[in-house]
Image (spheres, rainbow, N blue to C red):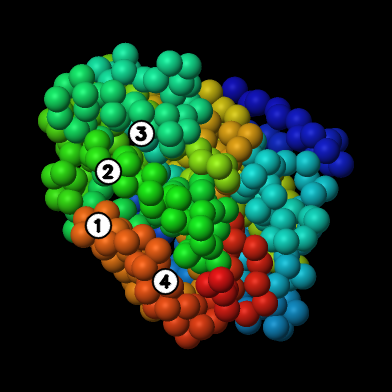
């Protein structure tokens, strides 16, 4: 069946045909995403099946940027559409990208649409797909939610009270945290705790609000399974019952939902005084100003944003849609559960995204280590919070100055290296 979808906005007269010929000319889709052979093949055969004439070519960020810059410098080229992470686009000069406002397509999350403006008042790219970290719980924990708490709109205080209620009622701490050697604990601090309490990550690292954040996490740690220092994939602890309430990346919770979908629930991360901090991995599509066929490129961007294409992209990449869609029943239980939680989180009115660190080069590991060491000293070794933050602040400042990396959201923009204030 051929489905005709009308796109709202300035180009409302343009019809996008799903399941038929959409793009009339060859378009080079130059992407840093869906690089594994299986994903790239699925992109070509499934996602782009209705976009005849598209040449999908994924590449590593280095070669991707080298060719793009060469075409921009030459003033002409073959690349029609760009696919990349937010961090890739934020490092570019917006003047090299085509204003996409006239297409009338965007994400369901106003937060994402704002980020896609790259500090301008125009859509420099269109959010395309997303991944993230979420919370999950054994349904046995639900009766212990604090009075009046909405699991889809929890605060950190409510999460602490919930974990305390479970601890008291069961006699053992049942909050699980990925503090093991391969756990993604640093992403929790960078993308969740700090944005929720300080509305920043680098500038606010040693602020009074950061002290409060660590005090709150210390409270939560009192109800955390002490074996969490060995936990790296929380799906295992959900299945074993060692943890009833957990935080982790969607992919590291999948096994629990796929094996016992009726036993667990997924939900957004909690909110603090500065909003509902969360770390989205946002990929977008953009058009370079040197695109050889602007109309065909714009048609492809619109095609990528239709609900049918978004679901096909999910199947191909395990990245979740950014538009409102009803997920099909034949998707794995983990995808359905996590997809709903991610959508609620990114679309929350108090959403405050803490983006992946950008511009750090080979110092990314050192940056992460600052947060891991801070956690180990404050929470595990119980050292004074203020003293630890002042000490670690020097290490963080040195990394930022050496790399010259500018601030990323939610920190306020900077000229040059992001300052540790």
| In this rendering, the label closer to the viewer, 1 or 2 | 1
At label 1, counting other C-alpha atoms closer than 10 Å, the crowd grade (few under 14, some 14-19, many 20 or more) is few
Residue 94 picture location, percent across and down: 73, 67
**Residue 96 vs residue 205, the one in the foreground:** 205
Residue with the mark numbered 4: 390
Distance between the alpha carbons at the discs numbered 3 and 1: 19 Å
Local crowd at mark 3 within 10 Å, few (<14), some, or many (≥20)? many
Mark nearer the N terminus (2 vs 3): 3
Question: Which type of secondary structure does the marked residue at label 2 adopt?
Answer: helix
Residue bearing mark 2: 221
Q: Quickly name the residue at label 3.
A: 160
- Earlier sequence position, callout 2 versus callout 4: 2
Q: Quadrant of the N terminus?
A: top right
Tell me how far mark 1 sits from mark 2, CA to CA: 11 Å
Classify residue 380 by image quadrant.
bottom left
418 versus 335 height, above or below: below
- The quarter in which the C terminus is drawn is bottom right
Query: What is the distance, in whole Å, between disc 2 and disc 3 at their CAs?
Result: 9 Å
Residue 206 x %, y %: 47, 65
| Mark 1 / mark 2, whichever is N-terminal | 2
The CA span between labels 4 and 3 is 26 Å
Q: Nearer the viewer, mark 2 or mark 4?
A: 4
What kind of element bears circle 1? Answer: loop
Residue ID for mark 1: 382
The residue drawn where x is 58% and y is 68% is 407
Q: Foreground residue, 308 or 173?
A: 173
Separation of residues labelled 1 and 4 (CA atoms): 15 Å
Q: Earlier in the sequence, mark 3 or mark 1?
A: 3
Q: Nearer the viewer, residue 312 or 414?
A: 414
């Amino acid at each position: 069946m051929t489905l005709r979808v009308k796109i709202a906005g300035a180009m409302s007269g343009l019809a996008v045909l799903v399941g038929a010929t959409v793009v009339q000319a060859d378009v080079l889709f130059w992407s840093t995403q869906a690089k594994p052979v299986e994903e790239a093949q699925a992109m070509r055969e499934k996602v782009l099946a209705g976009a005849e004439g598209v040449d999908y070519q994924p590449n590593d960020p280095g070669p991707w940027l080298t060719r793009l810059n060469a075409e921009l410098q030459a003033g002409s080229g073959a690349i029609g559409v760009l696919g990349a992470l937010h961090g890739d686009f934020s490092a570019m000069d917006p003047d090299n990208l085509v204003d996409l406002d006239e297409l009338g397509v965007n994400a369901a999350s106003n937060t994402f649409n704002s980020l896609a403006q790259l500090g301008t008042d125009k859509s420099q790219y269109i959010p395309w797909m997303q991944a993230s970290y979420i919370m999950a719980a054994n349904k046995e924990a639900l009766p212990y939610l604090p009075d009046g708490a909405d699991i889809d709109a929890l605060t950190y205080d409510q999460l602490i009270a919930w974990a305390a209620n479970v601890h008291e009622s069961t006699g053992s701490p049942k909050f699980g945290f990925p503090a093991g050697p391969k756990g993604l604990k640093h992403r929790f601090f960078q993308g969740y705790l700090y944005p929720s309490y300080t509305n920043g990550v680098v500038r606010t690292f040693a602020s009074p609000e950061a002290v409060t954040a660590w005090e709150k996490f210390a409270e939560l740690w009192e109800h955390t399974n002490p074996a969490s220092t060995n936990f790296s994939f929380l799906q295992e602890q959900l299945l074993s019952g060692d943890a009833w309430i957990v935080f982790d990346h969607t992919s590291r919770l999948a096994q629990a939902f796929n094996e016992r979908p009726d036993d667990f629930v997924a939900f957004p991360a909690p909110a603090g005084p500065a909003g509902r901090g969360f770390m989205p991995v946002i990929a977008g599509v953009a058009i370079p100003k040197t695109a050889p066929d602007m109309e065909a490129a714009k048609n492809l961007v619109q095609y990528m944003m239709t609900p049918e294409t978004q679901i096909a992209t999910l199947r191909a990449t395990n990245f979740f849609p950014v538009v409102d869609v009803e997920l099909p029943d034949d998707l794995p239980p983990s995808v359905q559960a996590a997809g709903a939680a991610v959508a609620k989180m990114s679309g929350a009115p108090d959403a405050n995204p803490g983006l992946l660190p950008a511009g750090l080069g080979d110092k990314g590991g050192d940056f992460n280590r600052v947060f891991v060491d801070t956690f180990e000293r404050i929470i595990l070794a119980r050292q004074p919070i203020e003293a630890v933050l002042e000490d670690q602040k020097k290490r963080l400042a040195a990394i930022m100055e050496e790399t010259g990396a500018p601030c990323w959201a939610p920190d306020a923009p900077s000229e040059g290296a992001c300052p540790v204030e």
